[in-house]
Image: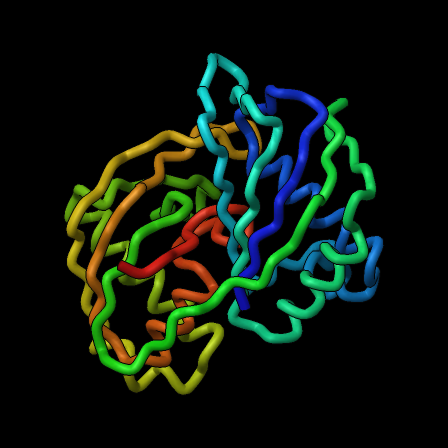
Amino acid sequence: MRYQVIVSLSSDEIPKDKNRMFLSLIKYHITENDKQFFELLYAEGETKRKDFTFSLYMPECEFLMDTIKIPNKKIFLNFSTYDLFTGIQFYNAMINGQRKEYSYKGIIMKIEKIELKKEKTFMGKTAIFKSLSPCVVREHNDETNRDWFHSLDTDRGKTLFIENLKYQVLESIEDSIYDLEDIKISIIKNKEVKVKHYGIEVLANICVFEMEAKAYILEYLYKAGIGSFKSTGFGMLSTL
């Protein structure tokens, strides 16, 4: 399921850590609508994969030193999920939250409109994807608890990107184990960007790539998003 939510702002400037701001808005409205569902997603002490993603469209925005200028005080939140139940819960939360004020660091945010968007149907084994929000390739060291972030312009980045997405697919669709080795990716275009995320700068990738995989895997990644931090505003995909 895929939606677009129009959010109005009381200020024409927002923090550069914009994903954190909008995830806070999402969490607030989910909690107000169904606290049990919120606890299912964000149970304390648990790290649970969430099969949704989102991106932000900010028309005519300007990136300043510490903030982002939003001239028309309006941002389009695009949301996508592979899970039908999550999609219904999100929709209900946004509908019930329409025109209710939510304050984030002194900025009043209001949901003005929510619209269901048409989704792509996958029949073949290849697709060309474009990132609507930057894709993160993360390498985590369990012993040191440190992260490294990689560019898709490097061989290491491409290798980790495929390894990570195979793990992601397998964790959500157990039967995919028989089809994972058939996945192939070719990077067509990539631009490295640095994104402020929960106080740190994350190297990410605005990219176009071709993927070869079974249709159900293409559909899953299209709906759930791809890469690390996808449920916090990274890795949302569209098709070309």
The reply to whether residue 21 is visible in this rendering is yes
The picture places residue 185, in percent across and down from the top left corner, at 19, 62
Residue 169, placed above or below residue 153: below
Residue 41 picture location, percent across and down: 68, 61
What is the x, y in percent for residue 195?
43, 31
Please tell me how many numbered marks the rendered image carries: 0
**What residue is rendered at 67% in x and 50% in y?**
113
Q: Nearer the viewer, residue 186 or 147?
A: 186
Instruction: Report the residue that reaches farthest toward the top.
Output: 65
| x 23%, y 45%: residue | 152
Q: Image quadrant for the N terminus?
A: bottom right
Query: Of 99 and 236, which appears nearest the observer?
Result: 99
Residue 209: x %, y % from top left:
22, 56
Locate residue 38: give its quadrant.
bottom right
Q: Is residue 200 left or right of residue 136?
A: right
Name the residue nearer the viewer: 197 or 15: 15
The quarter of the picture where the C terminus appears is bottom left
Residue 140 lies, with reference to residue 14, above or below; the image says below
Q: Where on the picture, by quarter, is residue 133?
A: top left
Residue at 51% over, 42% down: 56
Residue 139 visible at all: no
